[in-house]
Image: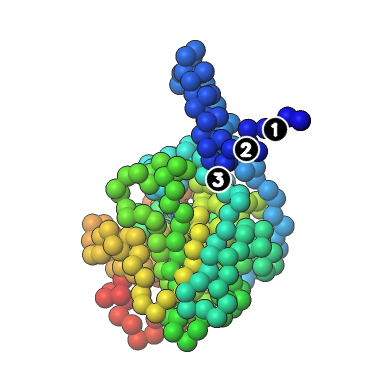
Amino acid sequence: MLIKPSEITPQQVYESRRQFIAKMALGAVAGGALWEMANRAAFAQEPAQKLAAKLNPSYAALDKQTPFKDASTYNNFYEFGTDKDEPHQSAHTLKTRPWTVTIDGEVKKPVTLDIDSLLKLAPLEERIYRLRCVEGWSMVIPWVGYSLSNLIKKVEPTSSAKFVEFTSLADPKQMPGVGSRVLNWPYVEGLRLDEAMHPLALLGLGMYGQTLPNQNGAPVRLVVPWKYGFKSAKSIVRIRFVKDMPRTAWNVSAPNEYGFYSNVNPEVDHPRWSQSSERRIGEDGFFQKKRKTLMFNGYSEVAALYTGMDLKKNF
Ligand code: MTE
């Protein structure tokens, strides 16, 4: 009987050995391009899988959708580098199956769910959301997922749960950017519990009718359309319910620039640039007039979450 190396060697050791052998062999003859091909083969990205989802008309922005090509090649995912085109070039090394998300902290029913259970937890919906990046650009993306509240209700937060903390994977073996000091890894984001329960807050499992490309945060991410894009943590491995406001990655790195709330607000400028307008990726030419940024990115139904709060102080 033949035993495959993959059966006797732990998966990662086996994979890195396969890569090493491929690299040695190819390095000798060709280098560059061939090594890149072998590397891609060794870390084959999960093929995109179609996701059946019904459009939710209550959450279907009428704006022209951003072409898939732009949405999947112009990305922020610092775990794969800080340039916009690095994530789509490098994120094929992210292994998105098997994948689990641990949901714990101040909950009555902590649980670890694999990605198939998450895909089945609630009916998948298509929602067309605008997403506004703090850098001054925006996109319109047809996401696939369901309200995060479906998941929150399952774990039954205790009365002490006031905030929800989201943690992204930080594995330097799969994510070359995690070796850099650009942020404190892992990437952590957070919401107040009532924000997380708002029906607009989406647990994203796909886009454009299929599973998420790695560079867009496969296999599971957050999409919080009334907040700057960085609140929408990608490739989430843990969701923790806590008493105190989480220390989020961007807030820790530059507290005077990135607050906890980070609601889209054209009246509160970033200390280094205006937030009053935005460039729509894929639609507007570089010299095209910019669009006006709208309060809460146009999602005025969330305003009641902030009644009585000074949104200049709580930026
Ligand atoms: N999540 C992680 N883990 N790492 C990141 O660097 N970047 C954020 C957010 N989520 C980021 C992240 C920022 S700044 C933005 S604008 C959005 O992801 C971009 O999402 P998109 O590439 O799908 O448009």
Crowdedness near tag 2: few (<14), some (14–19) or many (≥20) residues, C-alpha within 10 Å: few
State the residue lying farthest toward the front. 1
Please name the residue that numbered disc 2 is placed on.
8
Q: Nearer the viewer, mark 3 or mark 1?
A: 1
The type of colouring in the image is rainbow
Q: Is residue 183 depicted above or below 256 in this figure?
A: above
Query: What's the distance in space between the residues labelled 3 and 1, CA to CA?
Result: 24 Å
User: Reading the chain from its start, which is encountered first: label 2 or label 3?
Assistant: 2
Closest to the observer: 107 or 226?
107
Image location of residue 313, percent across then percent down: 26, 75
Please name the residue that numbered disc 3 is placed on.
95
Question: Residue 251 has which mark?
Answer: none
Q: Quadrant of the C terminus?
A: bottom left
Q: Which residue occupies 66% across, 53% down?
A: 209
Question: Which quadrant holds residue 63?
Answer: bottom right
Residue type pointed to by label 1: Ile
Q: Which residue occupies 35% across, 74% down?
A: 245
Q: In the image, is 8 to the left or to the right of 225? A: right
Query: What's the distance in space between the residues labelled 2 and 3, CA to CA?
Result: 20 Å
Q: Quadrant of the N terminus?
A: top right
Q: Marks 3 and 2: in contact by CB < 8 Å?
A: no
Label 2 sits on a secondary structure element that is helix
Q: Marks 1 and 2: in contact by CB < 8 Å?
A: yes
User: Reading the chain from its start, which is encountered first: label 2 or label 1?
Assistant: 1
Residue type pointed to by label 3: Lys
State the residue lying farthest toward the right. 1
Residue 258 seen in the figure: no
- On the rendering, which quadrant does ligand 1 occupy? bottom left
Label 3 sits on a secondary structure element that is loop
Residue type pointed to by label 2: Ile
Query: What's the distance in space between the residues labelled 2 and 1, CA to CA?
Result: 8 Å
Please name the residue that numbered disc 1 is placed on.
3
